[in-house]
């Protein structure tokens, strides 16, 4: 926790004092923030947006730290991503989930790639559609194996569509994103991949976010989860978030998350805090 | 707590999807919200000022007749905002042909316009509505992606 805090301070210090000119040309907020699996998205969900602010022939780099604190779990995520030409995104995220009742850590790494296929969230009448891959490698497979998980590694693929509706609601700009994900990851992979219940599941994820102004965003996310393991049940996730994007180098997201029951420990609700620095 | 939000979420999406069908007859027109002709003139003036200060853009406007550009842009915004003007310049496609404008340059223009509207005190809703009306120009203006 201490190292997380010092990293956060570095982010704020660096993000707060670099001018916008050093970032890419895209409009503030269009790079999204950093979801728990890395890359560009909301709090718990990946979006079709490309990280950073790089437009044509420009690159953008982001780094983030996120902490999620619910009743019996504590998730720490660190990661970085690079976007190029508002077209391609490569990302990495390292997750550590502390399970308090058992005093053990579950860890995994997520390697992501995303390509924007068509559209632009701001400028085309059709949505921005992207295709993404997330390859996940679980480093603490003993626990998932004991719960009936088949594999320590797994790969999600997803198709995601996003659009900003100018003047969409009460004079404010409204952002919507829907994602269809093919996955066999139990609890995003922290409980392994595949199991007795099914092969791959197709799950639906959606975010809606209202830009109160250029810098403050209020949003809600819903993430359907697959049924993979027999030993423990899995439940859909949702969150309500506030994002503050003071400039192209810094974003801060606070959220209330409801993760329902995880590994049959019920009522996993709590707070989410994420910081992102972008260059 | 958030389970109640699922329903609200669906309602918001529906309302947003239907924002075009709402009857807006009682609301002031976008032209009025922008401050009528004088307000649009101010926005365009601030926008041109931003372009001139923007090293990424100033070169692209080297050969532009700024007075004509200003007049055309005022007419165009006025017409788009349902004001009493008629834009008589060339189509966006025609006037940007061969300029090789890429998405990065278009984004810079949009950012300069957003800043102009903010600095002239244009209400947020009017800013957003105008941006929504200008956004489709992307397809005519940007030729390099």
Image: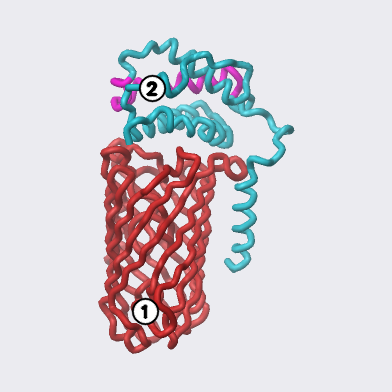
Chain colours: A red, B cyan
Query: Along the horizontal axis of the image, is A8 left or right of B135?
Result: left
Residue at 52 percent of width and 61 percent of height = A240
Tell me if residue B131 comes above or below residue B1 in the rendering: above
Q: Position of residue A134 (x, y in %)?
A: 32, 64
Magenta segment includes B57: yes
Query: Along the horizontal axis of the image, is A5 left or right of B109?
Result: left
Q: Residue furthest right?
A: B26
- On the rendered image, what quadrant is the C terminus of chain B found in? top left
Tell me if residue A267 comes above or below residue A157 in the rendering: below
The chain letter under disc 2 is: B
Q: Position of residue A116 (x, y in %)?
A: 36, 49
Tell me if residue A117 comes above or below residue A45 in the rendering: above
Q: Which residue is mark 1?
A: A194
Q: Position of residue A70 (x, y in %)?
A: 45, 73
Region in magenta = B35-60
Question: Is residue A143 or residue A204 the one in the foreground?
Answer: A204
Q: Position of residue A123 (x, y in %)?
A: 45, 38
Q: Secondary structure at mark 2?
A: loop
Question: Is residue B14 or residue A271 the one in the foreground?
Answer: B14
Magenta segment includes A155: no
The reply to whether dot 2 and dot 1 touch (C-beta < 8 Å) is: no
Q: CA distance from mark 2 to mark 1?
A: 54 Å
Kindly indicate the quadrant of the structure image that contains residue B107: top left
How busy is the neighbourhood of tag 2: few (under 14 within 10 Å), some, or many (20 plus)? some
Using the rendered image of the protein, determine whether residue A221 is visible from the camera's viewpoint. Answer: yes
Tell me if residue A237 comes above or below residue B134 in the rendering: below
How busy is the neighbourhood of tag 1: few (under 14 within 10 Å), some, or many (20 plus)? many
Question: Is residue A120 or residue B31 the one in the foreground?
Answer: A120
Q: Which residue is mark 2?
A: B96
Query: Along the horizontal axis of the image, is B69 left or right of A107?
Result: right
Using the rendered image of the protein, determine whether residue A74 is visible from the camera's viewpoint. Answer: no
Q: Secondary structure at mark 1?
A: loop
């Amino acid at each position: 926790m201490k190292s997380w805090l010092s990293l956060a301070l570095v982010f704020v210090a660096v993000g707060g004092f670099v001018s916008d000119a050093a970032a890419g040309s895209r409009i503030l907020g269009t790079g999204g923030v950093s979801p728990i699996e890395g890359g560009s998205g909301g709090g718990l969900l990946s979006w079709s947006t490309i990280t950073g602010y790089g437009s044509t022939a420009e690159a953008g780099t982001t780094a983030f730290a996120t902490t999620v604190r619910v009743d019996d779990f504590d998730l720490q995520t660190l990661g970085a991503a690079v976007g190029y030409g508002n077209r391609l995104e490569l990302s990495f995220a390292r997750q550590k989930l502390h399970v308090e009742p058992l005093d053990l850590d579950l860890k995994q790494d997520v390697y992501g790639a995303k390509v924007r296929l068509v559209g632009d969230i701001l400028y085309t009448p059709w949505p921005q559609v992207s295709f993404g891959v997330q390859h996940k490698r679980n480093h603490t497979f003993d626990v998932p194996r004991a719960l009936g998980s088949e594999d320590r590694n797994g790969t999600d693929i997803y198709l995601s569509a996003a659009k900003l509706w100018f003047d969409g609601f009460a004079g404010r700009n409204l952002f919507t994103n829907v994602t269809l994900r093919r996955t066999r990851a139990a609890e995003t992979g922290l409980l392994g991949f595949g199991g007795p219940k099914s092969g791959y599941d197709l799950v639906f994820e959606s975010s809606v976010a209202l830009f109160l102004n250029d810098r403050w965003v209020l949003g809600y996310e819903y993430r359907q989860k697959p049924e993979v393991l027999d030993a423990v049940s899995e439940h859909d996730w949702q969150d309500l978030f506030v994002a503050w994007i003071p400039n192209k180098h810094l974003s801060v997201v606070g959220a209330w998350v409801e993760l329902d029951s995880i590994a049959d420990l019920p009522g996993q609700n709590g707070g989410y805090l994420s910081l992102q620095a972008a260059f | 707590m958030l389970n109640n939000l699922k329903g609200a979420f669906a309602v918001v999406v529906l309302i947003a999807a239907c924002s075009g069908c709402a009857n807006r007859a009682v609301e002031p027109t976008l032209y009025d919200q922008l401050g009528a002709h004088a307000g649009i003139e101010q926005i365009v003036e601030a926008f041109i000022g931003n372009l001139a200060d923007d090293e990424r853009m100033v070169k692209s406007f080297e050969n532009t007749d700024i007075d004509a550009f200003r007049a055309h842009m005022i007419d165009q915004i006025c017409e788009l905002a349902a004001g009493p003007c008629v834009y008589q310049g060339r189509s966006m496609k025609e006037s940007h042909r061969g300029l090789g404008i890429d998405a990065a340059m278009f984004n810079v223009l949009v950012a300069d316009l957003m800043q102009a509207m903010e600095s002239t005190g244009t209400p947020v809703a009017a800013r957003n509505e105008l941006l929504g009306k200008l956004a489709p120009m992307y397809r005519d203006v940007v030729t390099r992606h």
